[in-house]
């Protein structure tokens, strides 16, 4: 019973839609109708403003960290802490307060991992930062998630990292109702670049600028 309650609490904590809240406060708009229609901090930052975007990102990280921290303080074992982390990301991505709309879950995932397995987070961020600089942030995010899975293979943290990888890919494809199975390029672009079309890598853009000079 205690396990059930802490999982429900973790979901509800993760479901707090800070991106939606801060957009309403700062811009009096609905973030689900702006940009890529997600409550993610990146969407708020790009399409609403730097301050509400930063606040959204920070709060999304903190709610993930808090879900795991409370489970640990209550004496739950690592597998329950991992499930609390999972339910926190579930809440963020499919919030009951927004008719199951939400964000992508990257910030909340990082917050959970910060408490759950800080070493895995640290070592996963190294290749992320490198590839984000030379390739693309969206592609680097996939590599970051894959690194976290690889580093948690022999631990109970895998209960958290493996499902979240598929949650985030699923959110990249949403709204799924707008996709056609025949449009493979659109599906691949959304999965890899989190966009509706393919675009050049960062190093390609740099080379293009240099050659133009």
Image (tube, rainbow, N blue to C red):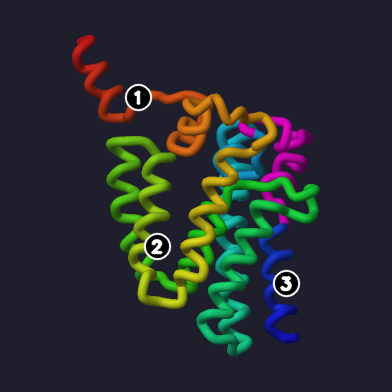
Q: Main secondary structure of the magenta part?
A: helix
Of residues 205 and 44, the one nearer the viewer is 205
Q: Tell which residue pokes out farthest to the front in this image.
A: 182
Where is 189 relative to 55, above or below? above
Instruction: Give the quarter of the figure containing the C terminus.
Output: top left
Give me the residue at 67% from left, 46% from top.
19
Element class at badge 2: helix
Nearer the viewer's eye, disc 1 or disc 2? Answer: 2
- Taking depth in this image into account, of 207 and 180 the one nearest to the observer is 180
Q: Earlier in the sequence, mark 3 or mark 2?
A: 3
Point out residue 35 in the picture as x, y percentages from the top left corner.
63, 30
> Which of the numbered marks, if any, corresponds to residue 200?
1
Q: Which mark is residue 10?
A: none
Position of 207 with respect to 15 (left or right) is: left
Q: CA distance from mark 3 to mark 2?
A: 25 Å
Residue 153 left/right relative to 33? left
**Could you tell me residue 196's position as x and y percent?**
53, 26
Residue for badge 3? 9
How packed is label 1: few (under 14 Cα within 10 Å), some, or many (20 or more)? few
Q: CA distance from mark 1 to mark 3?
A: 42 Å
- Coordinates of residue 179 in the picture (x, y in percent): 62, 30
Residue 149 badge: 2
Local crowd at mark 2 within 10 Å, few (<14), some, or many (≥20)? many
The image position of residue 103, as x and y in percent, is 63, 47
As for residue 20 lying within the magenta part, the answer is yes
Report the span colored magenta: 16-36
Q: Nearer the viewer, mark 3 or mark 2?
A: 2
Q: Spot the residue most to the top.
A: 212
The local secondary structure at tag 3 comes to helix
- The residue that appears at 65% across and 40% down in the rendered structure is 38
């Amino acid at each position: 019973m205690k396990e059930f309650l802490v999982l429900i609490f973790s979901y509800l904590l993760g479901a707090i839609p800070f991106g939606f809240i801060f957009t309403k406060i700062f811009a009096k708009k609905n973030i689900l109708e702006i940009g890529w229609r997600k409550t993610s901090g990146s969407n708020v930052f790009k399409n609403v403003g730097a301050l509400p975007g930063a606040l959204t990102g920070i709060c999304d990280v903190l709610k993930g960290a808090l879900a795991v921290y409370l489970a640990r303080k209550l004496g739950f074992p690592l597998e329950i802490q991992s499930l609390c982390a999972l339910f926190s990301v579930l809440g963020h991505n499919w919030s009951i307060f927004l008719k199951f709309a939400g964000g992508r879950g990257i910030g909340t995932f990082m917050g959970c991992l910060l408490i759950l397995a800080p070493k895995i987070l640290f070592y996963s961020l190294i290749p992320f930062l490198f590839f984000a600089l030379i390739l693309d942030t969206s592609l680097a995010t996939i590599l970051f998630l894959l690194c976290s899975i690889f580093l948690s293979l022999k631990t109970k943290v895998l209960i958290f990292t493996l499902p979240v990888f598929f949650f985030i890919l699923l959110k990249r494809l949403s709204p799924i109702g707008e996709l056609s199975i025949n449009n493979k390029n659109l599906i691949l672009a959304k999965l890899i670049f989190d966009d509706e079309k393919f675009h050049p890598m960062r190093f390609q853009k740099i080379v293009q600028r240099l050659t133009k000079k």
